[in-house]
Image (cartoon, helix red, strand yellow):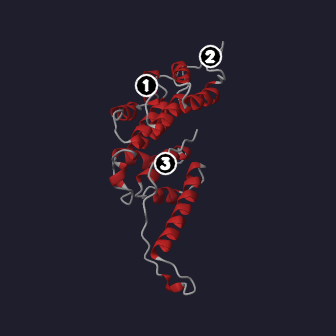
Amino acid sequence: MLLVITGCDDRQETTNNDSAVNHPSISSSPDTVNQDKKSKDEQYYQERFKKIVFGTAQLADVREALTDQDAGSLTNTVHGLYAMRWHRGVLHILQDMWQLDKTRYPELAWDLIGKPPVRLALASSMNRIQTSGTREFVEYLRQHKNETHEFNIAQVAVGLGFHGDPADVEYLKSLASGNNHYIVQSSLTALSLMNNPAARDALQDIIVKFKDDPRSSLAMELLQQAYGVQTGIAGPGEEQKNNQPSD
């Protein structure tokens, strides 16, 4: 499953050194030129990101994407690299990123890779990719449960959602009961990813507790999609299998 977590801020403004003298018939203000450059950069980013999430990117595309100095875009790229887990070169890059080993890829955005939110996305992707020895990734996510920035909290929530340990359900439920719309949406999504009865029940509780709130509708939609429950009340035979905690 691919999940893209968009940031709250726009992509970082890029500078443009091109002059308008090459287009004498067009009177372009510096703001217009900069906006055109930003639009082209955004289009290029989206095209490259699409190749990554569909698993068709070349290693050179991945390395270039990981030089992005916009934290939100880089975070989404790291999440997207789960789709390229079959690529040995990508696995090596992710492992070096986690170890903060700059030797082979000095051009990467290491100043962002070593801290949230990018490192939280990295922990989530590594936890999903590796089949054993994942405790350090889960512990890193849990160590950041009290982050204050909503985008960082979203990474923690979704990372724990993919992990699927029932021990994290109450934390996610508390986030889903808060007042920050972005965090509420992320934590409800995380509960839908967990695939266990405790998370299913938490979604049902949210539906009842916030019946006059838009989050109730979202919770019901996710409950139906993830657990096949349409009424908010689980029927016979609808209980899902528990995911196991990390080793």
- Image coordinates of residue 127 in percent, x first then y, are 45, 35
- Is residue 235 positioned above or below 159 on the image? above
Q: Nearer the viewer, residue 241 or 207?
A: 207
Screen quadrant of the C terminus:
top left
User: In what element is the residue under mark 3?
Assistant: helix
Residue drawn at x 37%, y 50% is: 113
Is label 3 in contact with label 1 (beta carbons under 8 Å)?
A: no
Is label 2 in contact with label 3 (beta carbons under 8 Å)?
A: no
Residue 132 is labelled as none
- Is residue 234 positioned above or below 190 on the image? above
- Image coordinates of residue 43 in percent, x first then y, are 56, 62
Q: Is residue 76 left or right of residue 231?
A: left
- Is residue 145 positioned above or below 203 on the image? below
Label 3 vs 1, first from the N-terminus: 3
Determine which residue is flagged by label 2: 234
Determine which residue is flagged by label 1: 168
User: In what element is the residue under mark 1?
Assistant: helix
Label 2 vs 3, first from the N-terminus: 3
The picture quadrant where one finds residue 132 is top left
Count of numbered labels shown in the rendering: 3
Label 2 vs 1, first from the N-terminus: 1
Q: CA distance from mark 2 to mark 3?
A: 34 Å
The nearer-to-camera label among 2 and 3 is 2
Neighbours of disc 2 within 10 Å: few (<14), some (14-19), many (20+): some
Neighbours of disc 1 within 10 Å: few (<14), some (14-19), many (20+): some
Q: Is residue 123 in view?
A: yes
Residue furthest toward the top?
236
Q: CA distance from mark 2 to mark 1?
A: 21 Å
Amino acid at circle 3? Asn
Amino acid at circle 1? Asp
Determine which residue is flagged by label 3: 76
